[in-house]
Image: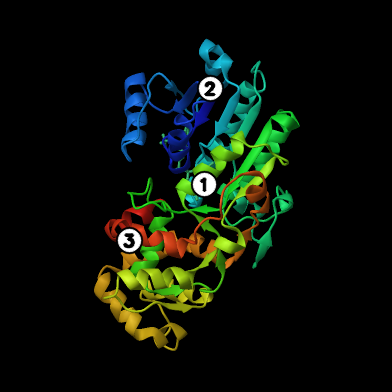
Amino acid sequence: MNIFLTGATGLVGGELLVTLSRRSEINKIYCLIRSKTKEEATVRLQNVFDLHEDYFDKSKVVPVLGNLFDDDLTESLSKDAYLSEVDVIIHSAANTSFSRFNDDAVEKANIGGLTKILLWAKALPHLKTFLYIGTATIVGKDVKDRVIHEDESPNIDATHLVKYTYTKMKGELLIREHLQKEQILIARPSIIMGDSRPIIPRSPVILWAMATINHLRLIPVNEHAQLDIIPVNYAAEAIVKLLFAKRKYSVYHISSGEAGATTALKLSKTLEAYFDEMPPFNFIDKSLLNQVKHWTKGKLQPDSELYTYREYLDYWKESFPDKSKLRILFSGLDPYLDFMELGHVFDNTRLLEDVHIANSVPADIYIASSMSFVEKLDILEGAIDP
Ligand SMILES: NC(=O)c1ccc[n+]([C@@H]2O[C@H](COP(=O)([O-])OP(=O)(O)OC[C@H]3O[C@@H](n4cnc5c(N)ncnc54)[C@H](OP(=O)(O)O)[C@@H]3O)[C@@H](O)[C@H]2O)c1
């Protein structure tokens, strides 16, 4: 098997790369890396392996220079004679930003970039499988508080909280337009946060949201809404096993399902046990977020409900003497709170049936081993580009 992998320097792609590199059935893993030189790209790949002291086999893992934004990406991949032996493509690269300031870049990478990869892929002489790393959240915001099945997406009429999920939905439709049915495999992870092993997590993404929630303590979100969260090592193991499995379907949730789901309340208990000197968590209605924003601007009406929580406002004043920082944190957190409110649980029956893997451990349990890392996260830095 000769694989072409995009997104190898990212949270999911990095873990996929390390997991794939251990499989003896794989001959080469060509990795699309956006670097100026082969040397720089090799250093970036080395960093992926070095993080957890994994072996980087340079005869097996080969960098290919390229950017999803390159106008000539399709042509440059087609011209590379080595790549004509590729029989599996794993497309994990994406712009995953929730910020509307990045909407254009999100569309350009996730739709434009994917189109360029597909135009190259469809002309490959030996392509067996195009594995697209999608996202279960493409189901949109109309569905709430229930278990969701793979067949409910992609739904062109779904409404989206952020451009990112819309582009991932469009991506699935594009793949169906360009490739043959038997070539398509879509893995839709739910929310990926941290690692369940007691090692430094591959990326602070999503953990940032939890660390921010931990600092704020008064949180406008429904603490009982179900959260489908999995660790990155589980996601990579499931996806790689899926690639080698005898499959009955072309679309699979990579998720916690009902058995492994958690809630904000359960996560808060894990956080409280470690950060026991901080105020206890208090969850309030999401509608109060606007009052929080007004308070940070010094414009909150005196009779507002938020003043019922005066001890938290005092705590915030002490922790964030510059209220504009608090405003930045809540703006960054806002889309995460919206996703948390949806109460989505993604059915994982297909995955468990076709792949020999156990249910994922609930996030409130596995995340306990990442607390010292959560403690060190710079929450303001993460808030700039959520
Ligand atoms: N994280 C989650 O919770 C989650 C959940 C469900 C699905 N997913 C899906 O999983 C996939 C990977 O996400 P992730 O969390 O690993 O994201 P990530 O950590 O942000 O990594 C994104 C990867 O894509 C690459 N990339 C971005 N723009 C590119 C461009 N213009 N040209 C070439 N490469 C580019 C990045 O390269 P650089 O290192 O050069 O920036 C990086 O390797 C995505 O398709 C996402 O939709 C993620």
Colouring used for the render: rainbow
Question: What kind of residue is marked 3?
Answer: Met
* Classed neighbour count for the residue bearing mark 1: other residues with Cα under 10 Å, few (<14), some (14–19), many (≥20): many
Query: Can residue 309 be seen from the camera position used here?
Result: yes
* The one of 98 and 244 positioned closer to us in this rendering: 244
The residue where tag 2 is placed is 73
Residue at (67% x, 66% y) in the render: 146
Q: Vertically, is 153 above or below 270?
A: above
Say what secondary structure mark 2 lies in.
helix
The residue where tag 3 is placed is 371
Say what secondary structure mark 3 lies in.
helix
Mark 1 C-beta closer than 8 Å to ligand 1: yes
Question: What kind of residue is marked 2?
Answer: Leu
In three-dimensional space, the C-alpha distance between marks 2 and 1, rounded to whole angstroms, equals 28 Å
Say what secondary structure mark 1 lies in.
helix
For residue 235, the mark is: 1
Q: Vertically, is 301 above or below 10?
A: below
* The one of 2 and 283 positioned closer to us in this rendering: 2
